[in-house]
């Protein structure tokens, strides 16, 4: 079944609020302004956003991105990426499809069992006693 796709602007918990509880999350990513999914945000970010990231995380401060959130303004990196047209994307299967997937899987196993039983029966009949 085709997964449900949701998009949201950059920011903490914005995308999570659009995914229902109990959903099977298949993929999360970041889209650039042309709608292409990117792997690493830093090389794909515009120069002005890269400058903000480097200001927030000077060289030699360790791994990861640490952001100084300005009260009332939120995360400056997210604001810059939103302005540049970046967004988040997620693909998931809703929990109400659980039993549909169970029926599909049961049908496949039942079909395989019938084929194997038929092949066994046919081989036994062909065999010389």
Image (spheres, rainbow, N blue to C red):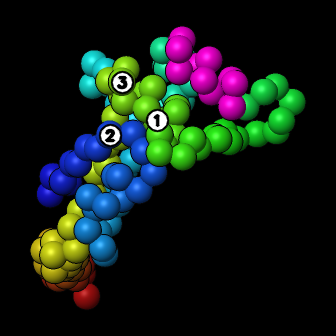
Q: Quadrant of residue 47?
A: top right
Q: Residue at x 52, y 33 (%)?
A: 76
- In this view, the residue in front, 50 or 99, is 50
Other-residue count near label 2 (Cα within 10 Å), few / some / many at <14 / 14–19 / ≥20: some
Seen in the image, is 62 located left or right of residue 87?
Answer: right
The reply to whether dot 1 and dot 3 touch (C-beta < 8 Å) is no
Question: What residue is disc 2 on?
Answer: 9
Residue 27 percent across, percent down from the top left: 37, 49
When the figure is inspected, residue 118 is found, relative to residue 80, above or below; the finding is: below
Question: What residue is disc 3 on?
Answer: 83
When the figure is inspected, residue 57 is found, relative to residue 107, above or below; the finding is: above
Q: Secondary structure at mark 1?
A: helix
- In this view, the residue in front, 29 or 65, is 65
The CA span between labels 3 and 2 is 10 Å
Upstream in sequence: badge 2 or badge 1 = 2
Q: Residue at x 39, y 47 (%)?
A: 28
Q: How many marks?
A: 3
Please give the range of residues in magenta: 47-56
When the figure is inspected, residue 31 is found, relative to residue 117, above or below; the finding is: above
Other-residue count near label 1 (Cα within 10 Å), few / some / many at <14 / 14–19 / ≥20: some
Instruction: Tell whether position 109 is magenta.
Output: no
Residue 51 percent across, percent down from the top left: 62, 17
Upstream in sequence: badge 1 or badge 3 = 1
Residue 19 percent across, percent down from the top left: 28, 61
The reply to whether dot 2 and dot 1 touch (C-beta < 8 Å) is yes
Q: Secondary structure at mark 3?
A: helix
């Amino acid at each position: 079944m085709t997964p449900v796709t949701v998009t949201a602007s950059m920011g903490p918990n914005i995308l999570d609020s659009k995914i229902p509880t109990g959903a099977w999350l298949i993929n999360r990513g970041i889209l650039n302004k042309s709608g292409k999914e990117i792997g690493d945000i830093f090389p794909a970010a515009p120069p002005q956003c890269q400058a903000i990231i480097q200001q927030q995380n000077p060289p030699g401060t360790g791994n990861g991105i640490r952001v100084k959130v300005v009260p009332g303004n939120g995360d400056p990196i997210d604001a810059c990426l939103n302005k540049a047209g970046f967004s988040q994307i997620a693909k998931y299967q809703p929990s109400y499809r659980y039993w549909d997937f169970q029926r599909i899987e049961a049908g496949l196993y039942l079909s395989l069992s019938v084929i194997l039983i038929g092949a066994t029966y046919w081989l036994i009949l062909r065999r010389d006693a």
